[in-house]
Amino acid sequence: MGLREDRVKIIPAVQEEILQHAREESPQECCGLLSGEREIITRLHRMRNILRSEVRYAMDPTDLFHFFKELRYCGYRHLGIYHSHPMSEAYPSATDIEQAFYPNCSYFIASLNCNCLPSLRAFTITGQAVMEQMIDIVTG
């Protein structure tokens, strides 16, 4: 599979669940993985932020192993990774860019840094190149 396009498709329930997870874990960063079929994100897999940090996240390697095992069993594809920035904008930090190990995935960042509505943005990250993706909300 080549690099992802400049658009990413996600169902509304998963978009809302990302924001809800961010709210629940604040002021710590939340994190999780996204999967689906036919390039549409239809499933969210919450992960534990083992760093329990307000500015960084890391997923438990055992949880990651189980996620990829489940994907193979169910026939879904790993399409994205998400995490939150409770106190900063929804844009990849230097650490996020350095640790972007899945160039074919979309990286979603939920920001709670606004007194109004939380924001959600998506990016592709390849090497040091960050490109924002438009988020298309679609029905399954």
Image (cartoon, rainbow, N blue to C red):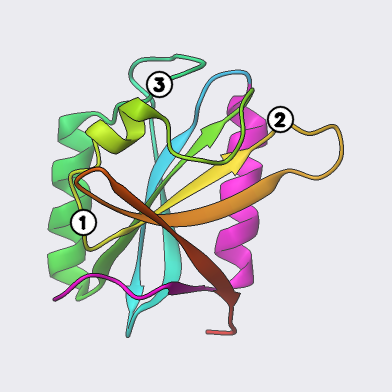
The image shows residue 38 at horizontal and vertical percentages of 32, 85
Left or right position of 29 against 34: right
Above or below: residue 66 compared with residue 104 = above
As drawn, is 86 to the left or to the right of 41? right
Q: Distance between the residues labelled 3 and 2?
A: 15 Å
Q: Where is mark 1, residue-wise?
A: 103
Q: How crowded is mark 3: few (under 14 residues within 10 Å), some or many (20 or more)?
A: some
Q: Residue 56 carries which label?
A: 3
Above/below status of 13 relative to 75: above
Which callout, 3 or 1, points to the residue nearer the camera?
Answer: 1
First of labels 3, 2 by sequence position: 3
Q: Distance between the residues labelled 1 and 2?
A: 27 Å
The answer to which of marks 1 and 2 sits earlier in the sequence is 1
Residue at 49% over, 32% down: 30
State the residue position of label 2: 113
Residue at horizontal 51 percent and vertical 44 percent from the top:
109
Task: Say what amino acid the circle numbered 3 marks.
Answer: Arg
Is residue 40 positioned above or below 92 on the image? below
* Residue type beneath disc 2: Asn
